[in-house]
Amino acid sequence: MKFNFKAKTQAGEYKDGIINASSKESAVAILQKNNLLPISVQSEKEGDQLVKSFLKYYDRVTQKELVIFFRQLAILIEARVPIITSLSAISEQTSNKYLVKVIQEIVNDIEDGMSLSASMERYKNVFSNLSINIIKAGETSGNLKKSIDYVAENIERNYTLYTRVKSALTYPMLVLIVFAIIGFLVISFVIPNLTAIIKEMNADIPWYTQLVISVGDFMGAYWWAVAIIIIAFVSGAYYYLNTDDGKKEWDQIKIKLPIVGPIFRYVYITRFAENLGVLLTGGIPIIRSLTIVSSVINNIVFENIFLAAAEEVKRGGNMSTVFKRSADIPPMVTHMVKIGEESGQVDSVLGHIAKFYDQETEIMTKNLSTLLEPLLMIIIGIAVGFMAFAILMPIYNIAGQIK
């Protein structure tokens, strides 16, 4: 039989997992032999395993739902409601079934003697390292409510930053995709029928009309092969970008793209300054804070920069030394961080950096939307005008000669 267990090591760390044993008593004995103190041991039925495998496709909690969760938890704790009662109340009014399941598991863990942060650590697909460590610092300092507020505000700001960039890029991408699909259908099925008239007349036509006719004939005959190639290319690119090498390459490319590259860089700098400032304010040591921030930045280039900064600080150096060597960190950030290090007010300086680059990101995303809309209209207009000029003009000339 399979048993889900929660146990504590001799060092005081919490462990959980699945163990095979003939009975619950045997499972407890196996854990004890491995120097683990069992907290709970429960049998796992076959139906539970099927449900778990099925839920893997739906185990998703949005940033907005996390903000609401932490806001509600902070209010209830401030009202001196016990944490188990608070979590139970939140689970009753949460619509996300997976989040309800996670909250109920956290309640069970706390009842079994776990801390809130230790239980959250079991669900790293829901809670980030940054959130877990801020909560852990709050538990240590005895100011859990303030730490939960920090987490809620941090997630909310990160969510706002993400949606701002996403909304700026969604519209032009959607327009381009729709235009590409319509263009494919027109070239494959409409153009061959229109150019059939020109070919039947055997009239002299300009080179660009002949080019359109040749492309139309090819697409009319082999559109299915072109569609397969396009689908295979998109699928291959999607698969590659989800591999470790693909993610690394895309992370490097995206910050160097024209127009949108600076926006991505500013987003990562804002995220770095915001998250590091919150961690330092929460009382987490700077080396650990830099390591945590590097894991939630979501870009390998900046992750390596911040890990290098952590190593530099560990050796007794400064973050600004590493930032100065990197072309991806703006000089203003380097100078401000250096001032913060010299004055002992790094967290305050990081707050100013986050505010400045957040404003810059907002301005750039608004300008991007304003710039791309007319640019897309111009590109689409040129494409439609060229097709009309290359096909309709020859047909009109032929019709005039017939008269």
Image (cartoon, rainbow, N blue to C red):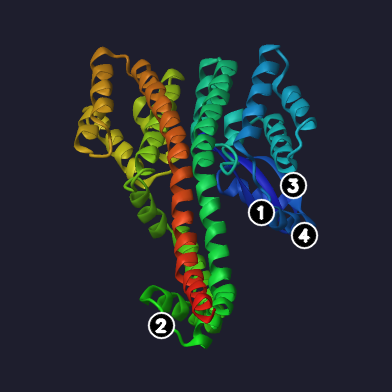
Vertical side of 16 occupied by 381: above or below: below
1 vs 4, front mark: 1
Q: Name the residue under label 3.
A: 42
Vertical side of 235 occupied by 323: above or below: above
Q: Which of marks 2 and 3 is nearer the N terminus?
A: 3
Q: Residue at x 51, y 75 (%)?
A: 400
Q: Which residue is drawn at 52% across and 66% down?
A: 235
Q: Mark 4 points at which residue?
A: 46
Residue 304 in view, yes or no: yes
Distance (Cα) linking label 1 and label 4: 16 Å
Task: Count the numbered circles shown.
Answer: 4
Q: Name the residue under label 1.
A: 56
Q: Look at the numbered disc 3 and give the secondary structure of its residue.
A: strand
Q: Nearer the viewer, residue 295 or 185?
A: 185
Q: Position of residue 44 (x, y in %)?
A: 75, 53
Q: Mark 2 points at which residue?
A: 204
Locate residue 326: give its quadrant: top left
**Considering the image in quadrants, where does the N terminus appear?**
bottom right
Amino acid found under the numbered disc labelled 1: Lys
**Considering the image in quadrants, where does the C terminus appear?**
bottom right
Q: Look at the numbered disc 2 and give the secondary structure of its residue.
A: loop
Q: Earlier in the sequence, mark 1 or mark 3?
A: 3
